[in-house]
Amino acid sequence: MSENSKPETGNPSAPRWEWLYVAGLALAGAALFCWRLGAAGLMDPDEGRYAEIAREILVSKNWLLPHLNFVPYLEKPPLMYWLTALSFGGLGYTEWAARLPSALGAVVGVFLAYGLGRALWGAAAAWAGALVLATSAGYLAMGRLLTLDMVFSLFLNLALGLGYLALSRERQGLWLWAYAALALAVLTKGPAALVLAGLIWGSWTLITRRPLRSLVQPRSWLLGAALALPWFLYVQWRFPDFFRYFILEHHLGRFLGAEMHPQPLYYYLPLLLGLLLPWSWLLPWALARRRALSDPARLFLLLWAGVVLVFFSLSRGKLPSYILPALLPLALLLGEALTGPPGLGRDGWQGWGGLRASLVLWGLTGWLLLGLYWWSPGPLGPAVARARVFAPVLPWGLAGFALAPTLTLIWRRPALLLAGALILSTLAPPVMERLSLRRSPKEVGLAAASHWQPGAALVGVKTYSPGLSFYSGQPFYLVDYQGELDFGRALSPAGREFFLPAAEVAAFARSRSRVLFFLKLPDLGPLKQSLPGNYPLLTPYRDCLLVLYEGK
């Protein structure tokens, strides 16, 4: 095993010009993650849910117990809710404010990739790796959405990177910062951060035959516990059933059971390629070009990504965003491969045959997809027609996807790939805006708000939309509803007023000045039978309707 990797020193002028790298990353981060951040409406279920929880924190002034529809919501820890509530408090209840914590987390994550890559291989490889990360489809999308995953990935990746530097460079002082970051990851999404960090650090020490006692850090453990444990202990004190619900049901239950988001074992392999687009075409070449064991840094990055993929592949419940922490180490490996020796110049492709083959496959695929978009054969017609909902963005994206590797093959400059990826990434905002037209309850929420008057009520019949609550500013009264609010309903007697038995709906509606019913079409007929009257349609939303009932 070779000694620890050292930062690149072959280019003595690099430090003088490094400010250009930093400025370039800052500009790219601001453009990719903040431009038109608030143009798309918040989408249900995740964005609407987390925005509404943050709004209710400010309305109730209760920062310790997250609430959704004004009943306790304890599926996840509160850090992301706190950050979103702070953003709302300073910037107002806007989509831009809602997504700002994720966007900032993404930008900081890009600089984290740069800092770690610079410590391992120097500024050039770090800059390329950071841009690969920023322009990867999955990272770009998650950085522009209000979810827990980007902030969780930031803190987890910060902890993992600092822990590796502490182990490999014998800088014990970094452990305190690593465990502080790990505690924040736990406060964002839960104990999975501890499991992943332990598996990755432990695997690396075993494979490199380092003493396991190097992982024993009592002071750092105490700091992490002091940051993360108080909230969990407080909630457990308030609600003795919290441990069973949070740990056994929503963590071990999702990992071992098949009820929540079941997917096959191989689910994340093709998904990873999608999340890394357009760079996934180069991933096999980047991973195979050198033996990982020749460089401890590459070995650690491979373990980092591999443990995340294997761990969540073994889970019975799977969601695409779970493997987001694997993108940073893979992006760094791609950045090092694109800038490391042997060099690629105008004189030839020495040592880059694998890259050339990957670019040829990438380019051919791009031109084929562009051709199918315009001249699709009969069997592909329906699929292409569905894809055309993203026109005119999609054809431009396919053209850019095909041109980037083609021009790189012609001029033999990998920098053209980075430029092409940056240009492609500018199409993300319009794509997400078009997607939000189908997924966001913004219009129905604004319609509810425009028809509101004192004494009105919003009633959901067998269905619930947290995004509709956020945009209307009103809680739901729920009829025959079973779902994510059930546990909080059992904990909070005060919140039970928002749950109506079906037999009481008619009396409740007649006691209100008007009622806005949110329901599916098959449930409208039974409602009219139990509560006769006119129900003018205010607006449809996906498979639901918002209708108006005038009471007293």
Image (cartoon, helix red, strand yellow):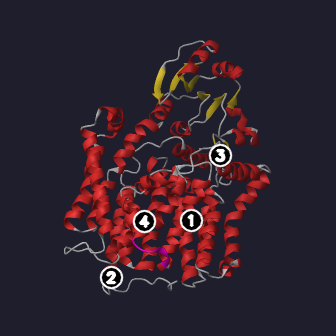
Residue under numbered circle 4: 331
**In terms of sequence position, does the residue under pointer 1 or pointer 3 come before the other?**
3
> What's the CA distance linking mark 2 and mark 1?
29 Å
Q: Residue 525 occupies which quadrant of the picture?
A: top right
The answer to whether 19 appears left or right of 466 in the picture is left
> What's the CA distance linking mark 2 and mark 3?
51 Å
Disc 2 residue type? Ala
- Mark 3 in CB contact with mark 4 (< 8 angstroms): no
Q: Is residue 87 above or below residue 125?
A: above
Q: Residue 276 occupies which quadrant of the picture?
A: bottom left
- Mark 4 in CB contact with mark 2 (< 8 angstroms): no
In this view, the mark in front (2 or 3): 2
- Mark 4 residue element: helix
Residue under numbered circle 1: 156
> What's the CA distance linking mark 1 and mark 3?
25 Å
Residue 352 lies in the magenta stretch: no
Disc 3: CA contacts within 10 A as few (<14), some (14-19) or many (>=20): many
- Mark 3 residue element: strand
Q: Which residues are magenta?
A: 289-293
**In terms of sequence position, does the residue under pointer 4 or pointer 2 come before the other?**
2
In this view, the mark in front (3 or 4): 4
The answer to whether 392 appears left or right of 214 in the picture is left
